[in-house]
Image: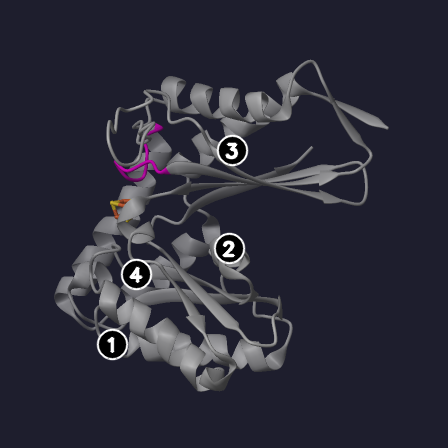
Amino acid sequence: MREISCAALQAAVTELFLKANREIAPDIRQAMEAARDAETSPAARYALEQLVDNYDCAREDGLPICQDTGMAVLFAEVGQEVHFTGGQFTDAVNAGVREAYVRGLLRKSVVADPLFDRRNTLDNCPAIIHASIVPGDRVRLLAIAKGFGSENMSRVGMLTPSAGEQGVFIYIVETARLAGPNPCPPIVVGVGIGGDFEQAALMAKHATARPLGQRHPDPRYADLENRALDAINALGIGAAGYGGLTTVLNVAIESAPTHIAGLPVAVNICCHASRHAETTL
Ligand code: SF4
């Protein structure tokens, strides 16, 4: 059994959310620079220049990339040979999130009750934690700071098997079309196909953090990713909604076994501020 202290877990979570909010991932930055250099629409090119400059300002000055610093989402793959000491796993994660958002002067965006009181919890807690047990004695953490301008544009569709590949393709592209400029494009699109209602959504969220350009291992899904990417870019929504060539930076699909009677599809939209960071303990 390998022991990992909750203090170490808490510190790692804090650093992940500080980093995610201040430093855009290199692949996102490169894709945005490439979009900027290729853009033919002056308005969209100007928007892309501003967005790339904003990444630099955030990193150099230790400021958040966006004022919406997101809900704290943590995927944790916990090796079954790990024993956490000195506290509780969930408490440590939330303490890490609290420390990041308070010390880092990140906006606190969580309300305790979703419908009635809607009072801010003042520390961006609780985090949304998706923990799974895996072989080994390591803990892999993936932190996502998820803004809701884009989250609100996401959809889950319980399609039937007869919808087939074309039905899924239409659902993905239609979700981006309905979103229009609201999710702060260029967007990143995560798609979950299969499982059940909630597993599809979970896969879609996880897929938003996949490195750009990394395709689904099954060439049929990889082809669907590429076709959806081209079709969404052909919508012409463009950077910040100013038209132009680049509406989406990536479409990433995760798939899972499902029921004989179903074809769940979830599309989770992320903005250009696709803020995620990961580490292994
Ligand atoms: S959608 Fe993204 S870029 Fe737009 S306000 Fe929200 S977090 Fe910021």
Decide whether residue 66 is among the magenta residues: yes
Instruction: Label 4: state its secondary structure.
Output: loop
Cα gap from disc 1 to disc 3, whole angstroms: 34 Å
- Observer able to see residue 238: no
Tell me which label, 4 or 3, sits earlier in the chain.
3
Q: Nearer the viewer, mark 2 or mark 1?
A: 2
Disc 3: residue Cβ within 8 A of ligand 1's nearest atom = no
* Image color mode: one colour
Q: Are the residues tagged 1 and 3 within 8 Å (C-beta)? A: no
Residue with the mark numbered 4: 186
Q: Position of residue 211 (x, y in %)?
A: 53, 57
Q: Is residue 75 left or right of residue 45?
A: right
Front residue of 272/139: it is 139
The image shows residue 187 at horizontal and vertical percentages of 33, 60
Eye-nearest disc, 2 or 4: 2
Q: Is residue 143 magenta?
A: no
- Residue 135, given in percent of the width and then of the height, sits at 80, 45
Q: Reading the chain from its start, which is encountered first: label 2 or label 4? A: 4
| 167 lies above or below 10 | below
Which label belongs to residue 198? 2
Amino acid type, callout 4:
Pro
Q: What residue is rendered at 39% in x and 17% in y?
A: 103
Magenta stretch, main secondary structure, is loop
Asked which secondary structure carries label 2, the reply is: helix
Residue at position x 51%, y 55% in the image: 198
Which image quadrant: the N terminus? Answer: top right
Of the 4 image quadrants, the one containing the C terminus is: top right
Front-lying residue, 240 or 191? 191
| Residue under numbered circle 3 | 16
Magenta residues, start to end:
62-70
